[in-house]
Image (cartoon, rainbow, N blue to C red):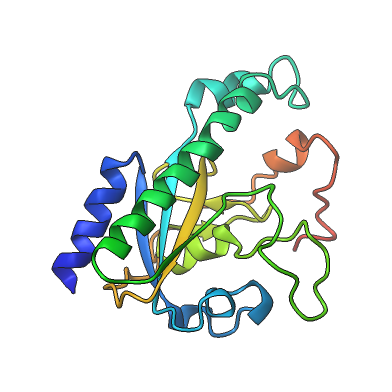
């Protein structure tokens, strides 16, 4: 299975992913069932997580003249969502071609596939990709709740594929802390939603 796992990762990068990690289903055992891989695919064994790096210039220019100005970031972000959805779709097709069940999860801003028990709202994720990225060993969650990778910091978008393929998992990230709590995110937040007394 190690060789097949490498084939999956290589294929994901050929499709345009900058980062690829594998999370075993056991790392989601404490996830709320209504937003978990096993809640969507009971026979799930692995989650393939991919990330695409934001263009640095778009991020840096997106805050000019003020952090409240989205500018180039919004433009290139609208390109990245379909790109990620295409990558995960093709990964799922690759897994299916090799005899496995695979379910690509949309990037964001989409409705759930179906209501689940007491969760009747439609604007809720089927799977939180940022936590899946942590479970796949790609990085950690910063103080502001964003996923951070050692390669790109917060400058990536993430998506996932749930599968019954028993892929070889990546180890959890165990490097230096990726968030130094500099609080620049608090200064830049357009809505003022990040408050130290709330996010500790």
Q: Is residue 98 left or right of residue 53?
A: left
Nearest to the observer: residue 10 or residue 144: 10
Q: Is residue 196 left or right of residue 113?
A: right
Find residue 12 and report its horizontal and vertical position in percent.
31, 49
Residue at horizontal 38%, vertical 58%? 92
Q: Residue furthest top?
A: 65
- Which quarter of the image is occupied by the N terminus? bottom left
Nearest to the observer: residue 89 or residue 83: 89
Find residue 45 and report its horizontal and vertical position in percent.
39, 79
Find residue 116 and report its horizontal and vertical position in percent.
74, 76
Q: Is residue 184 left or right of residue 86?
A: right
- Count the marks: 0
- Which quarter of the image is occupied by the C terminus? bottom right
Find residue 58 and report its horizontal and vertical position in percent.
55, 22
Which quadrant holds residue 127? bottom right
Q: Confirm whether residue 143 shows in the render.
A: yes
Q: Is residue 109 left or right of residue 103?
A: right
Nearest to the observer: residue 72 or residue 141: 72
Nearest to the observer: residue 189 or residue 86: 86
Q: Confirm whether residue 179 shows in the render.
A: no
């Amino acid at each position: 299975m190690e060789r097949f796992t490498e084939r999956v990762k290589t294929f994901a990068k050929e499709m345009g992913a900058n980062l690829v990690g594998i999370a075993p289903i056991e790392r989601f055992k404490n996830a709320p069932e209504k937003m978990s891989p096993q809640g969507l695919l009971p026979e799930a064994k692995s989650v393939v997580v991919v990330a695409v790096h934001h263009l640095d210039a778009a991020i840096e220019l997106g805050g000019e003249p003020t952090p409240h100005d989205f500018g180039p970031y919004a433009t290139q972000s609208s390109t990245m969502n379909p790109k990620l959805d295409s990558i995960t779709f093709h990964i799922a097709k690759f897994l299916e071609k090799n005899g496995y069940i695979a379910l690509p999860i949309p990037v964001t801003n989409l409705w759930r596939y179906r209501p689940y028990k007491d969760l009747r709202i439609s604007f809720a994720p089927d799977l939180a990709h940022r936590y899946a990225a942590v479970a796949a060993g790609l990085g950690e969650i910063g103080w502001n709740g964003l996923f951070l990778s050692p390669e790109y910091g917060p400058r990536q978008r993430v998506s996932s594929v749930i599968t019954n393929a028993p892929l070889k998992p990546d180890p959890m990230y165990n490097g230096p802390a990726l968030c130094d709590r500099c609080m620049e995110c608090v200064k830049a937040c357009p809505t003022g939603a990040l408050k130290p007394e709330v996010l500790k």
